[in-house]
Amino acid sequence: MTNQTKKARGKLNLVGLSKTDYKGMPTTLCQGCGHNSISSQIIAACYELDIKPETIIKFSGIGCSSKSPAYFLGRSFGFNGLHGRMPSLATGAMFGDHHQIGIGTSGDGDTASIGMGQFKHIMRRNLPLLYIVENNGVYGLTKGQFSATAETGLFLKGHGTNQYMPVDIAWEAVVGNATFVARSFAGDPKQVKELLKAALSHNGIAILDIISPCVTFNNTDASMHSYAWGREHEVALHELSYVPPREDILVEYEEGEVLDVTMHDGSSVVLKKLERDYDPTNRSRAIQLLEEANRKNWLITGLIYIDTNQPSLFDLYDLPETPLNRLAEDQMRPEPGTLDQVNAMMF
Amino acid sequence: MTAIQTKIKIEKPLDSRVIINDFSITVGTANGSGSQTSNLTLLRSLFKMGIPVSGKNLFPSNIQGLPTWYTIRVSKDGFLARREEHEIVVAMNPGSFIEDLAGVQPGGVFIYANDINLPIDREDIVIYPMAVQELVQESDAPSSLKNYVANMVYVGVLAQLLGIELERIYQALDFHFKSKQKPIELNFSIVKSAAKWAELNLEKRDPYRVEAMDETHDLIMADGNTAAALGSIYGGVNFAAWYPITPATSLVEGLEEYLPMLRKDPQTGKNTYAIVQAEDELAAIGMAIGAGWAGLRSMTSTSGPGLSLMTEFAGLAYYSEVPLVIWDIQRVGPSTGLPTRTSQGDLSMVNYLGHGDTQNVILLPGSVNECFEFGWKAFDLAERLQWPIYVLSDLDFGMNHWMTEPFKYPNTHMDRGKVLWEDDIEQLSGKWARYKDVDGDGIPYRTIPGNQHPASAWFARGTGHDENAIYTEDAGEYERNMMRLKKKYDTAKSMVPKPIIDVKQDANIGIIAYGSTLPAVQEARHHMAEKGLQTDFLRLRAVPFTQEVTDFIYDHERSYVIEMNRDGQLHQLLSLEYAPVCAKLTSVAHLDGLPMTARFIQDRIEQEEEKRK
């Protein structure tokens, strides 16, 4: 590649790539869709973190959200699987080369309706995976039915008023033993990006519930998944910034003003206090917070819960340094002599 | 010992016949009473005496209490299929006593625990009581184990009555209890005292005897699920995801038992495998597909109800072309069906598993040894064809112990299929397409996640895709891709195991069968040949059908298709494939959930042949 074309690609990061190298196909989602904004932040976060796209594997289920992995990280492998079954596909695939980084993109239907079971079980296993739920309270591809996260009383054209109680994804994640639970809002891209970076540094499952408005079917001012409602009701827990490994925290804070969470890879997440004291390492506090937020109609955003001490799935398996998918035949097929022993072990 | 008196003594004149190594023993016990140890001990002792023997557990879907039977066939001629005739019946369970008594062949033997106080109204058989409770009370077994060791009494009594060598029984116990002296001695002492008691208290009045032979010394005894697990291990399995289901569970338990012993990396001591117990069958196959896509030798094992749940994912693997191995240890359906009975009822479902146009590649092992062989071969086929490979075993293979040839080490290197790594992509200057038929065999090239070449990645999907794996709804692209998959299926015909064909002189009648019906077919053919009806035999080992199957059907005036299901599923598939000559095919299908008998096959074929006279 010549210097000229390098220049044309824009500024290069530490792995010699420009932001363009992190892009995917042009989106086919609606203009203004929250998911597109999230895709842009994924591109930005990975570029800024100097992650080689070849070291990332993308996963998704079915739905608008699950189409989006085609629109970011075109140089990463990806598997757009079945509705609600992204977690199992990701669990198996990540065993292929456990050094790779996994990003799962799901929606509220994909995760909280058809995929609730797999969602719960991927959390128990603590698979290292950034699990994004692009949560808009509505089914888009089938044209505007209620999802399980739709609030009671939501009115949708053609379907009337939702009578059922909603599923709170962050709540399910906290009680489901997820080791990283955050909520954000697609209308707050700066926070989305910082949370993505933090989540990508977590050694375990990182659930990121992002309210991501559906501009076509569920964006009226009264809807709890709309841009207007989000802007009006967002209550940020803290001002969150991600500090990469080996980089000093430059800004000075007053004592008691910040909380510094050290991540598995040596990076840290700096949480600057806003209106309230909040310690995201305290699970019962997280549950209380979500209760309060529900009661008061707050869209709580930020890092809700984190536990950096739990072993990840791969910590439990005693795998070789060489990825399983690069083992040679002599590492996979026992020596002939062993079969004589095996036959002798039969009766 | 001599002080113990039998409660009932029914005299019957001495039978002058002597029948050696040719009869069936059936033991009726209560489920969960520990009878499996006793039954396997009997089976293994006879096997170690060099006598051809088979054992089948006919058990209920229950943990404890319901009647369960174990039937052992001793056959000097090497016929090992189940028989419906029971010459010797042992009744340990009051709950099945009347049924057990009624089931004894005329001239046969009924041995029962003498604490069961039920009327015995048969004069045409020899009856021996066993002082089970007295012998157990006299033993030094701890009270918590007394019920379990009670079943060793019939082992000892049968040993005395039939002439089973006690040292062989010791050998069997030593194996069963992995040389742990305490349980071996405890059980063996009951066997010995029961044998002694029988010697002193029972007058031998029946004709049945065993005598040592030399027919088994180069064989092993194993169950099909263990064989499948071991075959998979020698096939290099890296990943297994599963969910418990009878009768498939013991397959993954076999992996759990033998992988730690056989598959630590020689250099690092690390595991070269991973097993995940999933939350259900959907997740089990989902994980297995993920792993197969990521370049692992990946598998799952299940049975019919599990496969029903896996269907959606099966379609994804077919269409996105992911290699993995799926073992189906068949049980009786539909629905929950008879969970502990055997069947070949999943063939049609598996053949088409998945909606839309799907046709799957299926392996059909016909012996425990072949469960091992197909265990490793299935991975080669899966990676070569980039498809799920289904291996249809059944409960009879999977959970019963069979004598079989020792497992043979794979005679070919692993075939990892058409995989492009970094250097390959570099040589192609980054120009390749995931679903392009470069070689004209319908099998494209693939790259595996983890490949660090910037041009290696592709986006797998269950949606319509073009050669570059990019989403498309283009009619031409869709059709081209589907026709390539059809071509790939045709290619599979040249790769799957060919049928085993046994041709007799002058036979114009064929028999087509597969799987665990093999012993019954062999025996039926023998008996029919003795009566002048010669048959040729094709043992099918895979679907799609190869040229040999075509030739066999065309070359025979008519063929009987033997299988264990209601609708004659193999007969249906063959009739579709060979529609112009389907009148040559007659279905002989056996339904009741019990392993096939030679008698059934023989009767049905003879009836059909009679109609033609």
Image (spheres, coloured by chain):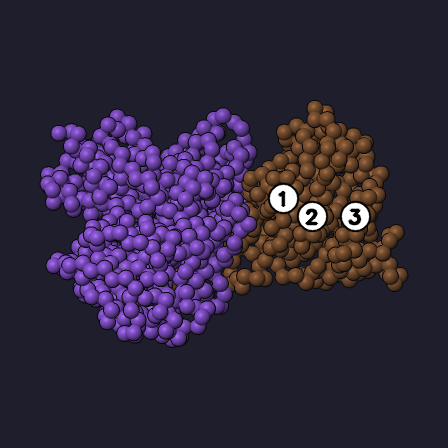
Chain colours: A brown, B purple
Q: Is residue A99 above or below residue A211?
A: below
Q: Mark 3 and mark 1 in contact (Cβ < 8 Å)?
A: no
Q: Say yes or no: labels 2 and 3 on the same chain.
A: yes
Is the Cβ of the residue at disc 2 closer than 8 Å to that at disc 1? yes
Regarding residue B101, the answer to whether it shows in the image is yes
Residue A236 place in picture, x, y as percent = 82, 48
Q: Secondary structure at mark 1?
A: helix
- In which chain is the residue bearing label 2? A
**Three-letter amino acid code at disc 1?**
Met
The residue type indicated by label 3 comes to Glu
Q: Which residue is mark 3?
A: A291
Q: Nearer the viewer, residue B13 or A259?
A: B13
Viewer-proximal residue, B467 or B306? B306
User: Real-space Cα distance between discs 2 and 3?
Assistant: 12 Å
Percent x, y of residue A198: 72, 54
The residue where tag 1 is placed is A116
Q: Is residue B152 left or right of residue B9?
A: right
| Mark closest to the chain's N terminus, 2 or 3 | 2
**Few, some or many C-alpha atoms within 10 Å of disc 3 (few <14, some 14-19, many ≥20)?**
few
Q: CA distance from mark 2 to mark 1?
A: 9 Å
Q: Which of the pair B271/B21 is nearer the observer? A: B21
